[in-house]
Amino acid sequence: SRREVRDFHLKTGRLASGETFPLGTTTVTCTATDGHGNQAQDTFTIEVQDTTAPNLSLPADITLEADSTSGATVNYTTPTATDVVDGPVSVVCEAASGSVFGPGTTTVQCSATDAHGNKATGSFRVTVVDTTPPALYLPENFAEEATGPEGADVSYTASAYDILDGSVLVSCDKSSGTTFPLGPNTVTCTATDEHGNQASSSFVITVQDTTRPDI
């Protein structure tokens, strides 16, 4: 009868449809009993699996100034990953926060793998730039006694150091060891690093005559 068929469908199952099934394979056993006590039983399996990779959260791209001849020490926000099944998952990056990055752009590859082998990968870029001119080391203004009517041969030392390139060649418009005429002489020097950053400064050499004539 129609009532018996309805009762047959209502008296089924140990785990109902809509319930939460654990990871792995679950065997569901169902029974049905009609109004006359006749019972039927059968089973089927439900497999719950995790094929979803963790959600990876990485720092934004970073650009910063070189702070040594090796490049720059870069500290970045710790990457995180969250898995829908395992929760927080550890993240591994090719270059750890606090590493020294060389000049130019480095792509940092990171990954996170959950307990079921699902792997998420991502990357961010670290760019180390050099926009700082070299530091010029020039003499203070000084005076030199004339040694003849042309003035005096004057020697001095000028150097430059760049935070990324190290020692840099200095070029001055009046070379050390040349003859400087009587009076004040402004010497202008420049130094340019490998990235085109230029420093320029000057000092004054005064050639004077304070020697009495011979009688």
Image (spheres, rainbow, N blue to C red):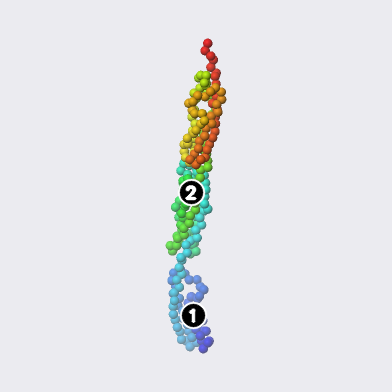
Q: Which mark is residue 59?
A: none
Residue at point 52%, 30% (across, down)? 173
Residue at point 45%, 76% (across, down)? 28
Q: Which mark is residue 12?
A: 1
Q: Is residue 130 visible?
A: yes
- For the residue labelled by badge 1, is the local secondary structure a helix, a strand or a loop? loop
Residue at point 50%, 46% (across, down)? 128
Mark 1 and mark 2: Cα distance apart in space? 64 Å
Mark 2 is on which residue type? Thr
Q: Is residue 74 visible?
A: no
Q: Residue furthest top?
A: 215
- For the residue labelled by badge 2, is the local secondary structure a helix, a strand or a loop? strand
Sequence order check: which comes first, mark 1 or mark 2? 1
State whether residue 62 is above or below residue 24: above
Q: Viewer-proximal residue, 5 or 119?
A: 119
State whether residue 137 is above or below residue 46: above
Q: Residue furthest right?
A: 184
Q: Viewer-proximal residue, 59 or 189?
A: 189
Mark 2 packing: few (<14 Cα in 10 Å), some, or many (20+)? Answer: some
State whether residue 183 is above or below residue 43: above
Image location (x, y in percent) of residue 19: 51, 73
Q: Viewer-proximal residue, 160 or 8?
A: 160
Image location (x, y in percent) of residue 67: 50, 42
Image location (x, y in percent) of residue 99: 46, 48
Q: Which mark is residue 105?
A: 2
Mark 1 is on which residue type? Thr
The quadrant where residue 116 appears: bottom left
Mark 1 packing: few (<14 Cα in 10 Å), some, or many (20+)? Answer: some
Q: Are circles 1 and 2 on residues that touch, CB within 8 Å? A: no
Residue at point 51%, 43% (across, down)? 130
Image location (x, y in percent) of residue 39: 45, 84
